[in-house]
Amino acid sequence: MNTESFEIKAYPEMWKDLGMDVERFDKMRLMLGEIYCKTYLTQKNRPARMAYFDEMIAEIHGGRIKELLAAKAEGHPVIGTFCVYIPEEVVLAAGGICVGLCGGSQGSIPDAETILPRNICPMVKSAFGFKVGRVCPYMQVVDFVYGETTCDAKKKTWEILDTMVPTYVMEIPQMKKQSDREMWLHEVKEFKAKIEEVSGKEVTVEGLNEAVKVMNSKRRALQRLNTLRHTHPTPISGKDVLLVEQIAFYDEPVRFAAKVNDLCDELEKRIADGEAVPAKDAIRIMVAGVPMALPNWKLHHLVEGAGAVIVNEESCIGTRYYKDLMDEDGKDMETILADLTKRYMNIDCSCFTPNDERIDQVLKEFRESQADGIIHYSLQFCHTYNIEEIRIREACIKEGIPYMFIESDYSPEDVGQIQTRVEAFLEQIHG
Ligand code: BJ8
């Protein structure tokens, strides 16, 4: 696809039926299309099989929404989530569909700020603003949303969001003691009961095992992609991998895994042919920290625009989502739910204390990705990541790893400043 032929498709009739602000949303669609062209379609030497993911963006507000509406008509509930701690396997086993609702757009933040305080995380404000402004078809299509208690901004926003769309909340403990593990297992069981109640379908052992296989396959495909991009020189840009990771949160999981594997086949061939993206001597950067929800491509665009390449995302859009699998043939419900809880408890979000596992994981991923330096990325007002950054920085200094911390939001205001800092950091690595 090229910049002339690319367009994010408009579906005004469907948007109207979904109760959206069609006129305003259409302007946002055009802006997103423009940004996508500039950020993605101007890249040189992209793998041909990125075409599927370009198409997923072209149909982000249409084709995929139609699929969700068709599934709803057949009785499959669509459930919106904001966090990788919500167990998708249980939703799939009840015949439901999960879509990620985290917001990565500046456009909806003024809507959120008519209600929420300004000084909270942009990810929360962006998602909440989508609902307030009626400018996101995913927010309109979901039957209900499932929030969690990972951070204060989120857990208090759910109370307000609940007045606009039914919002349930799963409690996530903040420590990993035995009592927390027991409490979480209890929460997972309650979650299952709630999903069964709203879907009207019982989650069976067979159904859950099947759902585990689907999710494992999807996570394996993403692991494979991440391992291939770690090759030196890398066969794919960091921006393209980030895009695939973001699409993972709204595409149909079986089709998505097949398309990621197709892309991986092409990357293997590129590696064999010595075809590198971008320059073979590009500085390799690993990003760690807060997830980047669609369409937050700011940091990747700046880093790769400066001639470096991003080779890993240690975040929930990246490895925290797919690094852990689970047993596929659980014998009974109790065993499967216990295994599932264990898998989800391995996710090392900064909302936990202590969180030493994450420090080790960052260092491990740095080595595996053959990166030259780490950028820790955080969003404004995200206290847990902003404070955990101190420990990541100390670990990097101790290991002699070039390190930089960037705290940002979704506005374009700090682009110039970040660009200068990124260039200075790359210069420092280059020596
Ligand atoms: S498991 S990282 S997806 S909570 S950035 S909204 S924490 S103030 S996103 Fe997350 Fe789950 Fe953790 Fe992952 Fe709050 Fe911080 Fe905003 Fe955040």
Image (cartoon, rainbow, N blue to C red):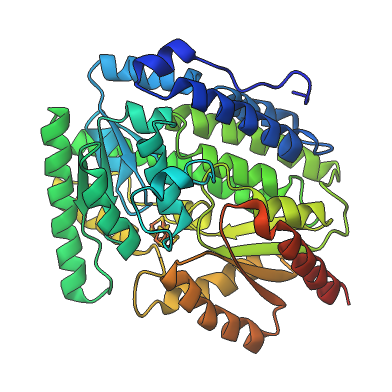
Across and down, in percent, residue 406 comes to 62, 68
- Left/right placement of residue 428 relative to residue 375 reads right
Residue lying farthest to the bottom in this orientation: 398
Question: Left or right: where does residue 249 sit relative to residue 369?
Answer: left
Q: Is residue 394 left or right of residue 93?
A: right
Q: How many marks?
A: 0
Confirm whether residue 407 shows in the render. yes
> Where residue 75 sits in the image (x, y, percent)?
22, 19
Residue 352: image location, x then y, percent: 34, 72
Task: Name the quadrant of the C terminus.
Answer: bottom right
In which quadrant will I find the N terminus? Answer: top right
Front residue of this view, candidates 41 and 364 = 41
In this view, the residue in front, 317 or 155, is 155
Q: Is residue 81 above or below residue 334?
A: above
Give the left or right position of residue 418, taking residue 227 as reference.
Answer: right
Q: Residue furthest top?
A: 13
Residue 336 visible in the picture: no
Residue at 27 percent across and 60 percent down: it is: 149
- Ligand 1 sits in quadrant: bottom left
Near-viewer residue (388 or 178): 388
Q: Position of residue 417 (x, y in %)?
A: 73, 65
Residue at 84%, 56% (x, y): give it.
Answer: 307
Against 166, is 297 above or below? below
Front one among 34 and 332? 34
